[in-house]
Amino acid sequence: MKSTQLVWPALLLGVTSLFTFGFGTTAYAQSLNPPPPAFEVCNGVGNGTICRGSRTEVLAPEITDVSCGSGATAFNIIDSSTLHQRATRYYDRNGNLTRISMLNHFTSGQWSNALTGKTVTYTQNNVTVDVLAVPGDLASATETTTGEVIIRNGTGAPVLIATGRQVFSATGELIFSAGRNAFVAAFFEGDPTAFDDVCAALAQ
């Protein structure tokens, strides 16, 4: 599952959504730091600039950090999905970025086991908000993610539910978490059983 996120599946591949998809340019005249992606349209407001846009991206299969089993039958889960995103960026009067808000909706979500061909499906909806302590400096951003991920087996029964709100420091440290979240349990709290039900569904 995808980006920096609850600890969303994309987080498994490295926080954060700040750098996803690369930056582009817009027709807006003022120089913006850093420049927004090409899919966003920018407009001047009384105290700065706001850039908004939406996009759909088919995300290629990627190997996650979720490992199942041991020995010859061990495998890392493979993740694929389609991202539908609405993004807004806020710049101050000097053209420096101060805040990013992204609404992320994932469809056709799937985790799979390359050894057996087994799959489970998932839905994911989350909002991420990045606030830059130093305008224009992405490395100073604190990220807050809220939403849910639900993974289901072949019968449609949930095998994992992750919900709540997580806050990450500028260095990627989890500084607050509320809600039921297997990703937090596994990668920040060291719970080795967090993905047992998902692994069992993929190993059958």
Image (tube, rainbow, N blue to C red):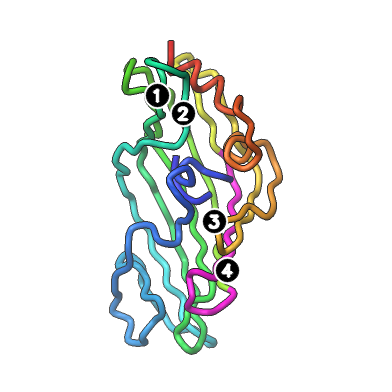
Q: Which residue is mark 3?
A: 128
Residue 66, position as x, y percentages in the image: 47, 32
Quick one: label 1 or label 4, which is nearer the N terminus? Answer: 1
Q: Nearer the viewer, mark 2 or mark 3?
A: 2
1 or 147, nearer to the observer: 1
Is 144 in the magenta?
yes
Task: State left or right for residue 31 relative to residue 193.
Answer: left
- Image quadrant containing the N terminus: top left
Kind of residue at badge 3 = Thr
Quick one: label 2 or label 3, which is nearer the N terminus? Answer: 2
The image shows residue 2, relative to residue 20, as above or below, that is above
The image shows residue 138, relative to residue 128, as above or below, that is below
Kind of residue at badge 2 = Ser
Is disc 2 in contact with disc 1, using a CB cutoff of under 8 Å? yes
Q: CA distance from mark 3 to mark 4?
A: 10 Å
The image shows residue 179, relative to residue 99, as above or below, that is above
Local SS, label 4: strand
Residue 122, position as x, y percentages in the image: 46, 31
Q: Residues within 10 Å of mark 3 (few under 14, many from 20)?
A: many
The image shows residue 52, relative to residue 162, as above or below, that is below
Point out the stretch of residues depicted in magenta: 133-148
Kind of residue at badge 4 = Val
Q: Which residue is mark 4?
A: 131
The numbered disc on residue 67 is 2
Quick one: label 3 or label 1, which is nearer the N terminus? Answer: 1
The numbered disc on residue 75 is 1
Local SS, label 2: strand
